[in-house]
């Protein structure tokens, strides 16, 4: 097979990606929120335990990292045809350090996964069993990430930087170079998740917040609201203020029952999570008893923490997008 030499002069730059994001923040971040909610939905509904799912993904990613280190690439089909996947030697202390878990939590989750036949442990040696692939196969995440990459090419095309590529193009490329490309994606995703947990205290809180935010983004999608700002932070402020105000004015929030239906989290647990988020000043309850994200006037401390997080996370998102675009189309 002939190896194609990359056209270095046509590599997409950081500045070009930044411009595309800033000018089309609403459409691109909508796709990003869809990607993250889909990821959380699969994570929660696999085990009803997001921490356990993240441990499984982390173990898989360690193997992908070893494959990359040795320039060993498998397609999506080849990787998931394995009866089991051996993991690089890892201790409970490694899991604790790398995923910001307590030692007792890490030990308990690994014991549960062993009991359920998801992994086999022999001291520091771990192998993931084929049955785990039912939960871990990132079918929806590949589709959602490919959709994000596609909408980025649509916006870059406007500036005549590259042509438009459909999501199917990226799905094919990712699956063909699965162990290489998905390792890069998971490195970015795990970094994001650790920041999320620190911000929201637990992953279920983050999932409930995300469904409220995504609902507001959907509500405003066809409202023809203008987003503007001279830098990324001000653009994000404008975006968040606009979608929140639109939601409040049009009574478009969510109730606990709907959130439970959308997430799969029991209604009683949803109510507890909503109360947690109100205390953190990340959401508010409006006069119709519907829940929306906080505003600069109501819950300003929480609004500022969220804004700082989203702005600080932008370089990670944009760098990952840029890398994948250069890998797959240049």
Image (tube, grey):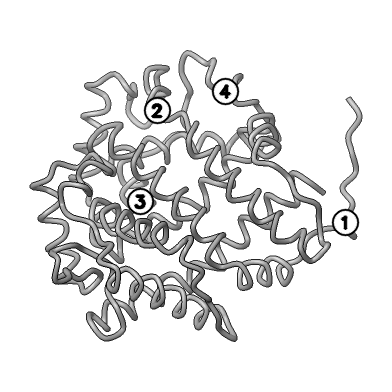
* Tag 3 secondary structure: helix
Q: Distance between the residues labelled 3 and 2?
A: 18 Å
Q: Which residue is drawn at 69% across and 29% down?
A: 176
Q: Residue 146: horizontal and vertical position, in percent?
A: 60, 43
Q: Distance between the Cα atoms at labels 4 and 1?
A: 30 Å
Q: Which mark is residue 99?
A: 3
In this rendering, which labeled residue sits more in front, label 2 or label 1?
1
Q: Which residue is drawn at 58% across and 50% down?
A: 148
Image position of 286 (left or right of 18): left
Answer with mark 4 or mark 1, whichever residue precedes in sequence: 1
Q: Name the residue under label 1.
A: 8
Comes first in the chain, label 1 or label 3 = 1
Disc 2 and disc 1: Cα gap in Å? 41 Å
Quarter of the image for residue 142 reads top right
Q: Nearer the viewer, residue 254 or 103?
A: 254
Q: Distance between the residues labelled 4 and 2?
A: 19 Å
Pair 1/3: label in front? 1
Per the image, the residue denoted by label 4 is 79
Mark with earlier residue (3, 2): 3
Q: For the residues carrying marks 3 and 2, which lies nearer the camera in this image?
A: 3
Sequence-earlier tag: 4 or 2: 4
Q: Which of marks 2 and 1 is nearer the N terminus?
A: 1
Residue 160 vertical placement versus 126 (above, below): below
Query: Considering only order in the chain, which callout, 3 or 4, is on the residue closer to the N terminus?
Result: 4
Give the CA distance from mark 1 to mark 3. 36 Å
Q: Name the residue under label 2.
A: 125
Give the alpha-carbon distance from disc 4 to disc 3, as whole Å. Answer: 24 Å
Q: Where is residue 269 in the image (x, y as percent from the top left)?
A: 12, 48
């Amino acid at each position: 097979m002939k190896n194609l030499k990359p056209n270095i002069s046509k590599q997409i730059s950081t500045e070009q990606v930044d411009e595309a994001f800033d000018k089309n923040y609403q459409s691109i971040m909508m796709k990003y929120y869809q990607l993250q909610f889909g990821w959380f939905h699969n994570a929660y509904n696999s085990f009803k335990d997001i921490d356990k799912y993240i441990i499984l993904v982390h173990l898989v990613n360690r193997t992908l990292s070893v494959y990359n280190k040795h320039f060993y690439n498998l397609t999506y089909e080849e990787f998931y045809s394995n009866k089991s996947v051996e993991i690089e030697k890892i201790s409970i202390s490694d899991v604790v350090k790398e995923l910001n878990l307590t030692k007792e939590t890490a030990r308990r989750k690994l014991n549960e996964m062993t009991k359920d036949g998801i992994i086999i442990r022999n001291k520091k040696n771990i192998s993931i069993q084929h049955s785990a692939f039912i939960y871990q196969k990132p079918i929806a995440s590949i589709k959602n990430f490919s959709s994000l990459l596609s909408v980025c090419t649509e916006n870059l095309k406007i500036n005549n930087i590259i042509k438009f590529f459909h999501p199917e193009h990226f799905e094919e490329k990712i699956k063909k170079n699965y162990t290489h490309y998905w390792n890069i994606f998971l490195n970015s995703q795990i970094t994001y998740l650790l920041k999320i947990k620190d911000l929201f205290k637990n992953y279920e809180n983050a999932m409930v917040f995300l469904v409220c935010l995504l609902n507001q983004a959907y509500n405003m999608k066809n409202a023809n609201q203008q987003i503007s700002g001279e830098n990324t932070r001000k653009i994000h402020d404008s975006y968040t203020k606009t979608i929140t105000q639109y939601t409040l004015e049009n009574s478009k929030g969510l109730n606990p029952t709907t959130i439970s239906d959308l997430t799969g989290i029991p209604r009683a647990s949803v109510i507890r999570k909503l109360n947690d988020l109100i205390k953190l000043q990340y959401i508010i309850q409006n006069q119709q008893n519907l829940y929306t994200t906080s505003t600069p006037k109501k819950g300003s401390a929480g609004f500022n923490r969220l804004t700082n997080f989203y702005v600080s996370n932008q370089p990670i998102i944009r760098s990952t997008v840029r890398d994948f675009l250069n890998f797959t189309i240049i």
